[in-house]
Amino acid sequence: MIEAELLSTLGFPTTRTGEPLPEAYLVVARRIGEARVRTVGFLPASSSVGVPPIVTRLGLALAQVTGATVAFVDANLRWPAIAERIAADENEGESTFVTRWLDESFALLVPKQVGPAGAGVPELKKLLDDGSELFAYLLVDLTGFRRFGEHLAAAKLVDALVVVAQAHVNTNEELLTLREELQESQFLGVLLVEA
C-alpha cells in the first residue's frame, strides 16, 4: 500500500495500487516500456516546471503497466525536491540516497542531505550503477542540473531523455533550444502537461 500521508505532504498523487491512473500516464508508461530503456532522465523545460509530481504518477503507471519495480530518483543534491521531508534512517548504509518504498513495486530515492556543487553527477552515476539490480526502471529527475551546466553530463548517464514542459507556459523556442543540446538517439520526446 502506498504511504498516502507521505505523498500528500509532498504534494504528490495519492493513487493506490489498483486504482486507475489517468490514461495519459499509462500511454507514456507504455511508450517507455516499448522503448526498452531502463533509466530515463526527465529534464524540465524551465524552472517553472515541477517534475516530481508528474514523474511520480508516471512511475506508478509504469509499475502498473509492466509489473516491474520502478524508482523515482530525486537526483538534485544541491536543491532536492523532497529530501527534507523524508528522514534518513541510520541503517541506510553509505549510500547518498535514502530509499522509501511506497508500495511493493514503487520507491522514492532521495538524497540524505544537501551535497556540494559538482557532487550530483558522480553520485547519480554511482546510484544508477548500484540501483540497476534492484529496479527494472529508474526515472530520474534532472531538475537543477542545467543551472550548473551539468545536464549534458547527467544525460549521458541515462538511457533516454524526456523534456517536461507546461502548455501555454514554455515556448517552442525553449523546447527547440533544449532539444538541440540533447543527443538524438536518447531523446524520447516532450511530455507536455497543463500549467
Image (cartoon, helix red, strand yellow):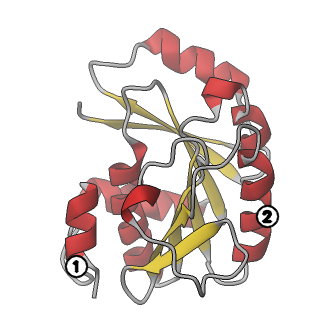
In the rendering, at what x and y percent does residue 61 appear?
36, 68
Position of 184 relative to 56 (above/below): above
Given the image, on which type of amino acid does mark 1 rest?
Arg
Circle 1 packing at 10 Å, graded few (<14), some (14-19), many (20+), is some
Position of 136 relative to 58 (above/below): below
Could you tell me how many numbered marks the image carries? 2
Circle 2 packing at 10 Å, graded few (<14), some (14-19), many (20+), is few
For residue 15, what is the image quadrant?
A: bottom left
Q: CA distance from mark 1 to mark 2?
A: 31 Å
In the rendering, at what x and y percent does residue 51 appear?
41, 44
Residue 29 appears in the figure: yes
Q: Give 184 or 45, whichever is nearer the viewer.
A: 45
Q: Give 145 or 112, whichever is nearer the viewer.
A: 112
Label disc, if present, on residue 126 of the rendered structure: 2
- As drawn, is 155 to the left or to the right of 104? right
* Residue that mark 1 sits on: 16
Q: Which element is circle 1 on?
A: loop
Position of 64 relative to 108 (above/below): below
Q: Residue at x 60, y 87 (%)?
A: 91
In the rendering, at what x and y percent does residue 130 appear?
76, 75
Dot in front, 1 or 2: 2
State the quadrant of the C terminus: top left
- As drawn, is 118 to the left or to the right of 53? right
> In the current view of this chain or complex, which residue is farthest to the front?
90
Q: Residue at x 57, y 16 (%)?
A: 176
Residue 22 appears in the figure: no
Q: Which element is circle 2 on?
A: helix
For residue 34, what is the image quadrant?
A: bottom right
